[in-house]
Image (cartoon, rainbow, N blue to C red):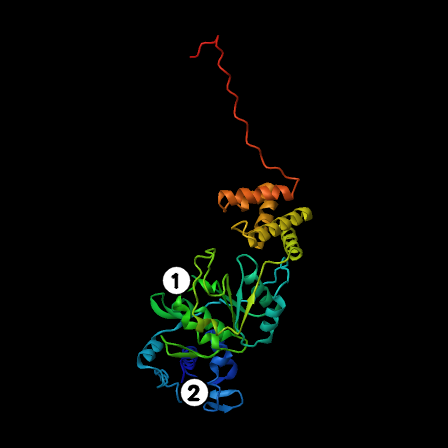
C-alpha cells in the first residue's frame, strides 16, 4: 500500500483499536483530515477490501499491535522514514476575498477563463513592477471561487521550501509538505510570485509544470495532481535577465524551464482611463474622494511614463505608487505632501523633477519656497566693528 493508505489506516486503528470494518465516510473523513483529500483514500475503497456497498474490511492489514507493511516499491531508506515521520498539516490554501476596489482590465478575462476551466494550463505573466499582476490572479481566483496558494520566490528559495522538508515539532521529526504539494493535492491555483528572482534550485518544479505526478524523495510518496490544479507565475522580466539594470535581482531562467509554460502574458501599465478608475476606487476605500486629484495624478503618471519611454527619465511612477499616494492623502489631506512623501524613495534629481512636474500639472498646489536668509547689515564706516 502507498504511504497515504498506511497513514489513514494507522489513524483509524488508533481511534478504533478493536474495529476492522469501516464505512466509506469514516475513511474519507480521515483522508481529508490528514490533508490527502478524497483521492488519498482511493486505494482503500477498492475491491480488495470491499465487503458490501460503502463498507470495507481491513482485517488482513489491521492486525493487533502491527502496522501495515509499506509497499515494496518504496526504497528501504524511504520506508523507514515514512514509518517514523508524519506530515504537519496547515491551511495555506484559501479562496481570496473579493476586493471591491479592484478594477478588471487587461488580460483579466483570459486569466479568469483559464482558472474557471480547471484545465492544467501554466501561464507566465511578465510586466513592470506595481502594475497589478499578482492582484489579477488573486481576484480571478476570488471571482471563480477557487482555492489559491501564493509562493513568494527569493534567491534562497529551494526544493525544501517548495516541495517540503523535515521539521522538528514537539520533539519529533515530521515531514512538512510544501506549498506546491499542497496545491497539487487540493487542486488549487499555485501562484509563483517573482519567479525571475529564483536560482536553478527551482528546477525541481519542471515535472510539476508538466502536470505530472511528483515523487517526494524524502518519504517515497508519489503525489498526483488533483483536477483543477494549475500554475501561474509572475515576473518583471521574461526570464532573460534585466538589460537596463532596473531589476538587478532578476535572473536568467533556464530555457527548458520557460518552455514548460504554455503561454506568456505581457502586462503593461493600465491606460489613463482605467488607472483613474483604480485611483478613484482607492479614494473610496480610504474615505477621501477627490476626483480632480485622481485626474491630476493619472495625468502626471502618464507624462512620466511617456518621458521614460523616450529616455528622458530613469524612473517610473507605478499604479501601486499612485494608490500609496491616495492612502497618504487620506491621512494628511494635502496633495503636495502626499506626492512628496511617496516619491521620496527616488534620488534627489528624480524626486525634484517629478515634484516640479506635478506642480505644473496641478496649479492648485505650490511648492514651499525656501526662507530668505536673514539680511546682514552693511558695516558703516562710522561704526567700529567689534
Q: Position of residue 34 (x, y in %)?
A: 45, 74
Q: Identify the residue shown where x is 34% and y is 68%.
A: 172
Quarter holding residue 320: bottom right
Question: In the picture provided, is 297 more to the left or to the right than 3?
Answer: right
Furthest residue toward top? 382
- Residue 272: tell me if it is visible: yes
The vertical placement of 230 against 134, above or below, is below
Describe the element under mark 1 as helix, strand or loop.
loop
The vertical placement of 368 against 68, above or below, is above
Q: How many marks?
A: 2
Question: In the picture provided, is 271 more to the left or to the right than 185?
Answer: right
Number of the front mark, 1 or 2: 1
Which residue lies under the disc numbered 1?
Answer: 156
Q: Distance of mark 1 from mark 2, alpha carbons?
A: 45 Å
Which residue lies under the disc numbered 2?
Answer: 58
Q: Quadrant of the N terminus?
A: bottom left
Crowding around mark 2 (Cα neighbors within 10 Å: few <14, some 14 to 19, many 20+) is some
Cβ atoms under marks 1 and 2 closer than 8 Å: no
Q: Position of residue 84 (x, y in %)?
A: 34, 75
Q: Quadrant of the C terminus?
A: top left
Circle nearer the N terminus (1, 2): 2
Q: Identify the residue shown where x is 45% and y is 9%.
A: 384
In depth, the one of 99 and 314 nearer the eye is 314
In depth, the one of 260 and 341 nearer the eye is 260
Crowding around mark 1 (Cα neighbors within 10 Å: few <14, some 14 to 19, many 20+) is few
Q: Position of residue 101 (x, y in %)?
A: 63, 57
The numbered disc on residue 248 is none
The vertical placement of 292 against 275, above or below, is above
Describe the element under mark 2 as helix, strand or loop.
loop
Q: Position of residue 242 (x, y in %)?
A: 46, 60
Q: Identify the residue shown where x is 61% and y is 70%.
A: 110
Amino acid at each position: 500500500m502507498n504511504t497515504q493508505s498506511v497513514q489513514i489506516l494507522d489513524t483509524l486503528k488508533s481511534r478504533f483499536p478493536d474495529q476492522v470494518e469501516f464505512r466509506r465516510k469514516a475513511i474519507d473523513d480521515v483522508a481529508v483530515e490528514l490533508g490527502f483529500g478524497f483521492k488519498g483514500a482511493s486505494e482503500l475503497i477498492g475491491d480488495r477490501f470491499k465487503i458490501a456497498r460503502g463498507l470495507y474490511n481491513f482485517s488482513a492489514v489491521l492486525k493487533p499491535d502491527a502496522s501495515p507493511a509499506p509497499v515494496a516499491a518504496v526504497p528501504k531508506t524511504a520506508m523507514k522514514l515514512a514509518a517514523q515521520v508524519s506530515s504537519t498539516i496547515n491551511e495555506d490554501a484559501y479562496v481570496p476575498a473579493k476586493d471591491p476596489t479592484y478594477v478588471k482590465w487587461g488580460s483579466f478575462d483570459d486569466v479568469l477563463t483559464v482558472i474557471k476551466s480547471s484545465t492544467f494550463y501554466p501561464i507566465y505573466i511578465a510586466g513592470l513592477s506595481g502594475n497589478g499582476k499578482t492582484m489579477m490572479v488573486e481576484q480571478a481566483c476570488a471571482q471563480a471561487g477557487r482555492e489559491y496558494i501564493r509562493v513568494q520566490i527569493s534567491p534562497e528559495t529551494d526544493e525544501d521550501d517548495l516541495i517540503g522538508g523535515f521539521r522538528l515539532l514537539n520533539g519529533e521529526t515530521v515531514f512538512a509538505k510544501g506549498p506546491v504539494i499542497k496545491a497539487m493535492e487540493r487542486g488549487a491555483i499555485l501562484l509563483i510570485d517573482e519567479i525571475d528572482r529564483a536560482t536553478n534550485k527551482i528546477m525541481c518544479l519542471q515535472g510539476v509544470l508538466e502536470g505530472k505526478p511528483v515523487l517526494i524523495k524524502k518519504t517515497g510518496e508519489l503525489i498526483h495532481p488533483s483536477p483543477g490544479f494549475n500554475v501561474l507565475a509572475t515576473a518583471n522580466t521574461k526570464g532573460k535577465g534585466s538589460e537596463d539594470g532596473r531589476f538587478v535581482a532578476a535572473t536568467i531562467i533556464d530555457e527548458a524551464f520557460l518552455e514548460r509554460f504554455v503561454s506568456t502574458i505581457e502586462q503593461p501599465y493600465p491606460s489613463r482611463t482605467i488607472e483613474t478608475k483604480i485611483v478613484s476606487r482607492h479614494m473610496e476605500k480610504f474615505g477621501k474622494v477627490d476626483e480632480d486629484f485622481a485626474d491630476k495624478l493619472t495625468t502626471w503618471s502618464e507624462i512620466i511614463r511617456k518621458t521614460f519611454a523616450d529616455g528622458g527619465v530613469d524612473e517610473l511612477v507605478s499604479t501601486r505608487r499612485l494608490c500609496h499616494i491616495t492612502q497618504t492623502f487620506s491621512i494628511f489631506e494635502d496633495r503636495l505632501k502626499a506626492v512628496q512623501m511617496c516619491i521620496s524613495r527616488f534620488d534627489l534629481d528624480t524626486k525634484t523633477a517629478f515634484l516640479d512636474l506635478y506642480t505644473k500639472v496641478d496649479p492648485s498646489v505650490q511648492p514651499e519656497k525656501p526662507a530668505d536668509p536673514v539680511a546682514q547689515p552693511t558695516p558703516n564706516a562710522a561704526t567700529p566693528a567689534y
